Amino acid sequence: MIRVKQLGSGEDQPWQGQGSGVWVDAQNLAPEELASLQRTFSLNPLAVEDALEQGHWSRAEVYPEHSFITVRSFARPEQADEFTERLSVFTFPDAVLTVSSGGTRALNAVWPLTGRDSVNNPQEVTYELLDHAADTFFAAADALEEQADDLEERVFQNQRQNPVPDVFELKHRIGQARRLATDAREATALLGRHAGGTPADLVRYRDVQDSFTRAAGRLDGLRDLLTSLLDLHLNLQSQRMNEVMRTLTAVSVIFLPLTFLAGVWGMNFEFMPELKSPYGYALAWASFLLIGGLLAAYFKRRGWW
């Protein structure tokens, strides 16, 4: 599918093979549509190969015919899942060509803006597309941060549940998001250094580069937070184990003198006067209860129980 907008007016018009003053958006290109675009625009073969390759990550290059950038961003940033989408942008002095497999969030957001004061030429269209792609990283970072906060709350509140698998899964997704943001930042930086344009256009590219840098920085902070969360979980587990061992030790200490007395009275000596006493059994139980109660009260007072 190919659709066209006239730059400056923002009006949609059918594809007629025109190659100047327009924004041409190509989605799910058929071979005959690709051939028509190659007849109209002077497309570098290496750029076309990158734009059509499946799974390609972000990169940029400035060819003699045009500047080119392909950016991979999040398809559903609010869910912060692993689904991504890719948009390739061919920027000419008086036209811009975008290629994607089925449209992207950035493309759908910028397409209606064409014709406004800030989206009137190919460089402005390229900037808006990159800027909206960077916004998906901030939305994904917000969603990932919310999930990290939930994990942190679970670590403190649910002592029996093991959060380690969820932490590692979230850490994997944050690492992937960071790689996406870093690649997009490097691609935008290369475009800003080598692409032609006015000083205002170069400022726009640097602004987008800064957006990707800040997104990568936020993701770095989240990754460090998860590392600290794992350390915190291990420390809490160790503390809980120490508390359990302290309680078991207190119980053992309580029964230690009782075991000693039972062992003494269980010896088979003939001359043990308390064994012959009618109050011997009651005396033994009174001794057990008194010693156990005093030790339990002492441990409770010291906070060991």
Image (cartoon, rainbow, N blue to C red):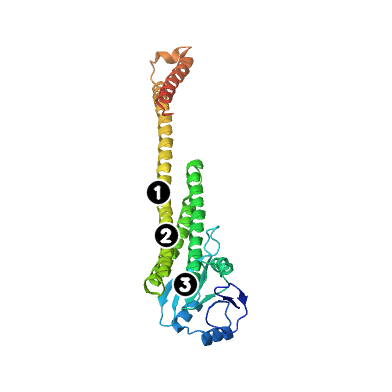
Q: What amino acid is at disc 3?
A: Gln
Report the disc number at residue 123.
Answer: 3
- Quarter of the figure with residue 44: bottom left
Relative to 7, say whether 263 is above or below. above
* Location of residue 275 with respect to 78 vertically, above or below: above
Q: Nearer the viewer, mark 3 or mark 1?
A: 3
Report the amino acid beneath label 1: Ser
Q: CA distance from mark 2 to mark 1?
A: 18 Å
Residue 31 or residue 214, whichever sits in front = 214
Q: Of label 2 and label 1, which has the lower sequence position?
A: 2
User: Along the line of sight, which residue is nearer the eye, 263 or 163?
Assistant: 163
Q: Amino acid at mark 2?
A: Ala
Work out whether residue 282 can be spotted. yes
Q: Which label's residue is closer to the chain start, 3 or 1?
A: 3
What is the x, y in percent for residue 234?
41, 46
> Which is closer to the viewer, label 2 or label 3?
3
Taking the image as shown, residue 114 lies to the left or right of residue 65, namely right
For the N terminus, the image quarter is: bottom right
